[in-house]
Amino acid sequence: MDLERARDSLIRSLDRDIADKRVIEAMWRVPREVFLSPEQKHLAYDDRPLSIGHGQTISQPYIVALMVQALELRGDEKVLELGTGSGYVAAILAELARKVITVECIPELAQSAELVLDGLGYSNVKVCTARGILGYPEDAPYDAILVSAGAPDVPQVLIEQLVLNGRLVIPVGSRWQQELLKITRVGKGTRVENLGGCYFVPLVGEGAWEE
Ligand code: SAH
């Protein structure tokens, strides 16, 4: 199947499950093959994660759509993504929010993501390399935070980087299986919704598993 037809078929299948049509349009506009190595490009519209080197993966399109939908973006938000990886999720977020700050702990991945995002013309994305701290307190508070790697618990430091009524979407659970949680900061606490099972590469550093 050629890429265009594969893309068409993937977007149509996402459209059946994802209610927020702005998310579907954003997924339609962002070419996933651009974030992949030449050997992987023909697989770009398979609905699964793919290797991007350094033991990391580009997230599965369906899970990306589910996570982004849960952030309830309307266009004027400042969003933080933890785990830039290829930059694919950052591009989708850049389509739907005012400003995206995305943090990656592997410098080579951050560099290549920045190049791809620049090449696509996203001027509202800031790619940062950081290790050892969780999130990016410098630009906090955020209207929404998306964590593209799995954690053993909900990190309180990320809740503290959210505005009131801000949304955090994060995979939480064991190393090999997590639940996708949507956490809304309300009053003095949080409201938690479970969006279902998922599997992500592990978050490293503070708030993560012992290495
Ligand atoms: N959204 C990305 C998914 C990348 S996989 C994409 O679609 O391409 C998760 C990424 O999180 C990996 O690149 C990994 O290096 C990064 N990561 C893990 N722990 C991190 C941390 N504490 N801070 C920043 N990035 C982290």
Image (tube, grey):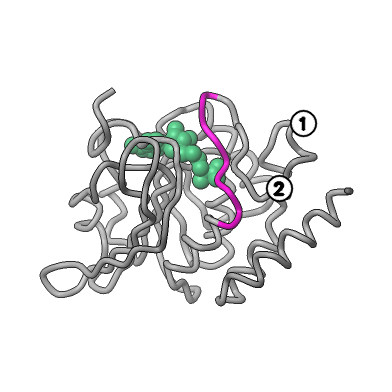
Q: What secondary structure is marked by label 2?
A: loop
Give the labeled residue for mark 2. 46
* Magenta segment boundaries in residue numbering: 54-62
Q: Is mark 2 within 8 Å of ligand 1?
A: no
Q: CA distance from mark 1 to mark 2?
A: 15 Å
Q: Residue at x 69, y 50 (%)?
A: 120
| Residue 38 numbered tag | 1
User: Ligand 1 is located in which of the four quadrants?
Assistant: top left
Of the 4 image quadrants, the one containing the C terminus is top left
Q: Is residue 121 left or right of residue 8?
A: left
What amino acid is found at the position of numbered circle 1 in the picture? Answer: Pro
Q: Residue at x 48, y 76 (%)?
A: 74
Residue most extreme to the right: 2
Please provide percent x and percent y for residue 156. Answer: 18, 52
Closest to the observer, 46 or 148: 46
Q: Residues within 10 Å of mark 1 (few under 14, many from 20)?
A: few
Query: Can residue 129 be seen at all in this image of the molecule?
Result: no
Residue 18, image quadrant = bottom right
**Viewer-nearest residue: 76 or 38:** 38
The spot of residue 119 in percent (x, y) is 69, 45
Sequence-wise, the earlier of marks 1 and 2 is 1
Q: Mark number for residue 73?
A: none
